[in-house]
Image (spheres, grey):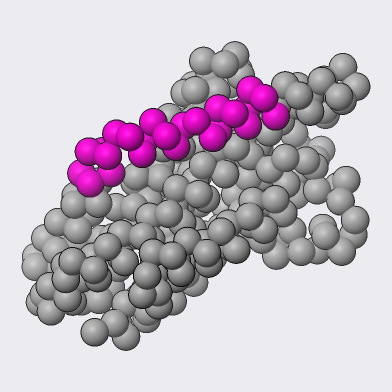
Amino acid sequence: MTEIRGFYTLWLREVKRYLRDRTRIVGSVVSPLLWLVIFGAGIGGTLGGGSLAGISYQQFIFPGIVGQTLLFTSMFMGISVIWDKEFGFMKEILVAPISRLSIFLGKMIGDSTDALIQGTIVVILGLALGIKFSLAAFLAALPIMLLITFGLVSIGLVIASFMGSLESFGAVQSFINLPLFFLSGALFPLQLLPTWMQWISKANPLTYGVDALRTVFLGEVWQPYQVQTLWVDLTIVGVFGLIMITIGTWAFSRMK
């Protein structure tokens, strides 16, 4: 019971802290909006008829921009660990009578919930921009989005557990975020890349998350271009999440 209460308290704290920061929520929508409207329309117009694989370029990058939102939001959540260190709250958590696993899971799933909310806002924004998808696709995408965030949030928390300043965290975060995003196939089909870049992309866990979202949102039209089948995508993303949770629990166990 103590473990469950501790987990719930940490989860609730992260969610409340996120919901109260309305400026960050609104600000996080601006970047996806620019990508979808300006980049989607601009690059889409340079393609033959503005279409790709039988769909508009804006529709093509939409799942990728959702993945980008999940990536950037998830990784940014690691900053909460540094703030907790700065104000001494982390020490209070670490001496609490609950396991480090419960501590890590509470923060990780709380931050994943925040990233899911942010991703859902972008999905609704895409609908407002005229990107069509069914209610069934939206409902199917939600658990996939949550699964994607587990591994990404864990990366941010692990990095933050080793960092002592916000500046250091920001530099490392950017160094990791950009390659993960640009090599995930979010903005262009992986088939168009050189062979050596395709191999690198296949080692990128976000590639399979974006591919799974495209499979759900685009349906049959995307099947000939899939990186893997949906279940293989989800298995890879899930295994990556479990590995990062294990590493994250270890990283929190070494903090004093």
Residue 210, horizontal then vertical, whole percent: 63, 45
- Residue 55 visible, this orientation: no
The residue sitting at 87% across, 17% down in the picture is 49
In the rendered structure, does residue 105 fall within the stretch colored magenta?
no
The residue sitting at 86% across, 47% down in the picture is 191
Residue 130, horizontal then vertical, whole percent: 59, 14
Is the magenta region chiefly helix, strand or loop? helix
Asked if residue 72 lies left or right of residue 11, the reply is right
Question: Residue lying furthest front in this view?
Answer: 167
> Magenta part of the protein: which range?
16-39
Asked if residue 131 lies left or right of residue 150, the reply is right
In the rendered structure, does residue 20 fall within the stretch colored magenta?
yes
Up-down: is 138 above or below 152?
A: above
Which sits in the foreground, 224 or 192? 192
- Residue 71 visible, this orientation: yes
The residue sitting at 30% across, 59% down in the picture is 80
Up-down: is 191 above or below 66?
A: below
Asked if residue 245 lies left or right of residue 90, the reply is right
Asked if residue 205 lies left or right of residue 141, the reply is right
Picture quarter containing residue 89?
bottom left
Up-down: is 131 above or below 249?
A: above
The residue sitting at 22% across, 38% down in the picture is 20
Residue 159, horizontal then vertical, whole percent: 44, 71
Which sits in the foreground, 55 or 46? 46
